[in-house]
Amino acid sequence: MAAKADSPIIEMCKVYKAFARPSGQPLPVLTDISLSLREGEILGLLGRSGSGKSTLLRIAGGLIKPTSGEVVYRGKPLSGPTKGIAVVFQSFALFPWLTVLENVEAGLDALGLAHDEARRRAMSAIDLIGLDGFQSAYPRELSGGMRQRVGFARAIVIQPVLLLMDEPFSALDVLTAETLRTDFLDLWIERQLPTKSVLLVTHNIEEAVMMCDRILVLSSNPGRIAAEIPVSLPHPRNRLDAEFHSIVDEFYSILTSRATESIGAQSQIHGGLVQPLRPVSINRLGGFIEALASSPYQGHAELARIARALALDIRDLFLIAEALHILEFAELKDGAIKLTAAGRVFAQSGTEERKRLFSEHLLRFVPLAAHIRHVLSEREGRLAPRIRFESELEDHLNPDDAENTLRTVIGWGRYAELFVYDDKTQMFSVNSSAG
Amino acid sequence: MEQHAEVLIGGEWRQSHPSWRDAIATLLVLAIVILLGSGAHQMLAPLVANRQPRISLSPSALPVYALRTTMRMLAALVASLIFTFTYATPAAKSRRAEMVLIPLLDVLQSVPVLGYLSFTVVFFVSLFPGTPLGPELAAVFAIFTAQAWNMAFSFYQSLITIPTDLNEASRSFRFSGWQRFWRLEVPFAMPGLIWNMMMSMSGGWFFVVASEAISVGNIQITLPGIGSYVALAIQQRNLAGVGWAIVAMTIVILIYDQLLFRPLVAWADKFRFEQTAPQVVPRSWVLDLFRGAGSLRLLGEPLGRAMQGAARARLALPRRPGWLRRFPAPRRAEDVVWFGFLLASLAYVGWKLVQFAKPELSWGDVSIAASNGVLTLLRVVILIALATVIWVPIGVGVGLRPKLAEKVQPIAQFLAAFPANLLFPVAVFLIVKFALAPKIWLSPLMILGTQWYILFNVIAGASAFPSDFREAAVSFRIRGWRWWRQVMLPGVFPYYVTGAITASGGAWNASIVSEAVSWGPTKLSGSGLGAYIARMTEAGDYPRIALGVAVMSVFVIAMNRLLWRPLYAFAERRTRLD
């Protein structure tokens, strides 16, 4: 779209957001965010879970107040949800007790329109978004794709200047998501929407390259803008284009270098004791190693390629890849993943050998696991309560990350037979045979 | 409102030929309006001073009495709803209000309703001397207190568990507080609220019957209703009269269920939050009738539009002026003031209490009440254990047979709703006739009405037990005691705990009317805390009534905290798979 590039719809300046930790210390989730959204553009926010991208979207929508920094919407400071901004939610957020029509009309409630006018506008939004004939259905009667269409209609009916989309397609299956994306892009390109700009939060690289004019990559813990990449391909874009591919690959290398940097940085703090881990099951790790070891990869694969082949989305892909990287069964580099020697041995081994190898790596490369073992061996009766490690973690991580990290270590430790954990008593112990 | 939405959309517009449905529906509406009107009229009729209405034991008088009783129930339900909305909303929205309101509600829930009936009667009678309005209000208040707490709790629970995304959607639409309340909060809370309303009503019949004929010291209260009818029948040793009252009550409960609750449950189904289509859609012929009757829909349309309009109106409070918003009061300082205020009021109330009790009560009284409490506690525990041993196997047996469960479940629910105090005279008659020991044989009366909660909850649990678990048990040939211990009992345990909590709470309440009973001039006492409270009520000894109620509340709270809550938490933890 032709853009008056110098009149930003929304502008953020040095936005910083921290949530309160139980200890009272602030936990930063976003730091030093400055961006501006220009008229006529779709801006993508690409990041992994924990990068604070959804928080950033909510700050843009006035749903969350930044701890510091400025948000300016059309020249005025933003102090809360305002008239020209609409949100499309990942989970649709439809009212289950209202019909499709009533859900769309609900968006107009705050405008205090006359009943007939509200009905007319709702019907035309329903029309535009392709929901004709579903007016009197309740959301639970609809498929996911239809539900998200209601989500779109409900946002569009208030004729927003700025449309905020929080992973709008990620709860849908691949085909449905593609259809909805294309339909939305068609409306956007044909300028059938009153909307002037769109902020799209996504963790799907191809989706971002498909839709956005400009993409900001957020790094994690705390989230900050790591890179800004313009996408100037003309619409409609083709996934099979070489240019499309090279942009996607660029993103993968940015994300891998970010991931390895962050892992490296975390392992420096407190001897790596508070390295956040995300739960990945042993079966997935094993399955991935096997796939990577066999042909056509033979131990080395580009992430974009193996993700497509194994039908993994980027969240799952990085979950697995990072776990393998931390455990040093594989190495992440430049958008590719490569098995280490230990990884190759693991792929070839039987159950017992795998367990032995895994336990060795767990003790060597996950300091928390070694720490738990150490505490248990020092303790009388070789028992230690969960709360002990939990509070250690919570001093440095937010409660969710702490919980996830502990859960992951428990899962991995159980597999490696490093220790026993009893959830009923919330106690760690060492098996006499294992000790 | 639902039916009007269809009309407005125009998609499902059906021709409004008058049909048989219209006739019946109109008749129903008119009948209910007229009946309620006349009932209310009688309630407000001035009473000649100090002359109690004469109760007739003729069965033909029963329909009118039943109507009066029902009116009290309805009035209390409306009051409970208003209370629920106004009490739970601030509790859920303000951290400071929550600190006070929720513990208070928790305690109120544990206070035996029948215990303080004497206070409220005196209070309301003195408020409206010379009219029946005082006792009427006291009766309504008693039912209200039996219903309101758990409804408020359920509403509060719903409000604090509203999903974040709906919350954010409402905020981004900039709903006003009023719009948010009717658009989001009330609908989201509806299924839980209606379920709790039904449970409350079931309990309510018991109290309405008990509160219609009471005597506190020298004040005699008789309100025309099924309860006073039974009271008179007891006085005159008229077993047939008791029988008629039982029949009348049965019919009333059945009608109530069909006309009020089934339609409500069927209607409330659309508020279910789960996004999946339900397997069994609750149906109600009354609701179908009303939805099918075109003429009524036309009549209802303006009403529906008005209600929709009201819910949509912004009614926003004026925003705080900008200069005020810029200087928010520091939270710390506000908190300090608030805590100070709370402490001061607490100290004042405590001091008043000591002032009230000191000249009247001694430690001896406390120990008498407490030892009576232990006796009643023993009864409650033994009876719950007995009911468990009997009803859990039966409930499981019924629940695993869907055909049978379909038939038994409504009966169990009906029995739970039926006010057991109407059956007491029959039991007392038998005890007197066979000269049985009252200390033992009066005890089962406590649980007569509430044991059914265990039964129907266990049936529900067994019906909901996943069939793949059952098949797994069969294929691994898990049988006999092992089957019960490892398969079935863990499966129904959470449901059982829910039922047992209700049953035990109900048993405490019932002890006040079941530990001391009479048949004509014969008086039987089983001793215990219930009998103690009943005796003091009859004597009009207010300090000791208060003491008895307080001791019972302490027992109930202790039992909840020490037994039921841990069990409930355990059940929740153990039966989760994720």
Image (tube, rainbow, N blue to C red):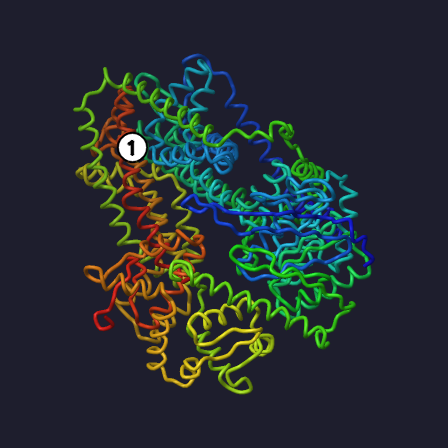
Q: Is residue A122 left or right of residue B400?
A: right
Q: Which residue extends farthest bottom? A: A295
User: Which image quarter is the N terminus of chain A in?
Assistant: bottom right
Q: Is residue A75 left or right of residue B41?
A: right
Q: Does residue B54 appear anywhere in the picture?
A: yes
Residue, x 52% and y 66% (percent of image)?
A: A259
In front here: B194 or A59? A59
Q: Note whether B158 is above or below B216 in the view shown.
A: below
In the image, A103 versus A216, the foreground residue is: A216
Q: Amino acid at mark 1?
A: Ile
Badge 1: few (under 14), some or many (20 or more) residues near its Cα, within 10 Å? Answer: many
Point out residue A143 in the picture as x, y percentages from the top left corner.
63, 63
Left or right: B504, with A135 as reference point? left
Q: To which quarter of the image does residue B121 belong? A: top left
Judging by the rendered image, the residue that carries numbered circle 1 is B512
Residue sitting nearer the eye, B25 or A42: A42
Q: How many marks?
A: 1
> Please, which chain is the residue tagged with disc 1 on?
B
Question: On the image, which quarter does residue B303 sit in?
Answer: top right
